[in-house]
Amino acid sequence: MNNKEMQFAYRVRHALDANLENLPETTTERLAAARRVALARKKAPARAVATQFAFAGAAGNGGARQPASLSWLGRLGVAVPLIAGIMLFAGIYEHEHKQRISELAEIDAGVLSDELPLSAYLDHGFNAYLAQRGE
């Protein structure tokens, strides 16, 4: 449809919507029948075409079912990247966990080797002093 046809269809639809209550019943029935006919003639939406990957040995088999060896190979093609991803995430988690432990050990070593007694860190006045000093 070009732009003029679209504008005309929009105007007709708007006029019908505005005067729907004033139309005779026979007209509304004819319009409903015309709509059903138009919907029946409407082209069906194009379906997505599934692509089938064929291996060199299975090419040209006329749509026959692939051998069992190819089906497990296809599953393996999905499983290997999935397992590799899981192993990668586990490795990253383990590395971050060790990094965090190392940082906490450095903090603990710093606190224990400091000249202040441990009770000073528990004092609320000391926290206020550190907050004031940090400003």
Image (tube, rainbow, N blue to C red):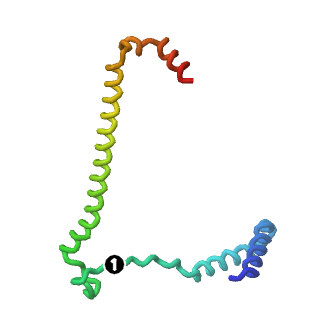
Q: Nearer the viewer, residue 79 or 15?
A: 79
Residue at 29% in and 84% down: 63
Residue at 73% in and 80% down: 3
Q: Position of residue 132 (x, y in %)?
A: 55, 19
Residue placed farthest to the front in the image? 115
Q: Nearer the viewer, residue 99 or 23?
A: 99
Q: Nearer the viewer, residue 111 or 15?
A: 111
The residue where tag 1 is placed is 52
Q: Position of residue 61 (x, y in %)?
A: 25, 86
Q: Nearer the viewer, residue 35 or 103?
A: 103
Residue at 24% in and 79% down: 65
Amino acid type at mark 1: Gln
Determine whether the residue tagged by mark 1 lies in a helix, strand or loop. loop
Q: Is residue 31 above or below residue 121?
A: below
Q: Quadrant of residue 80?
A: bottom left
Q: Is residue 78 left or right of residue 20?
A: left
Q: Is residue 81 above or below residue 90?
A: below
Residue at 54% in and 20% down: 133
Q: Quadrant of the N terminus?
A: bottom right
Q: Quadrant of the C terminus?
A: top right
Q: Quadrant of residue 81?
A: bottom left
Q: Is residue 120 left or right of residue 83?
A: right
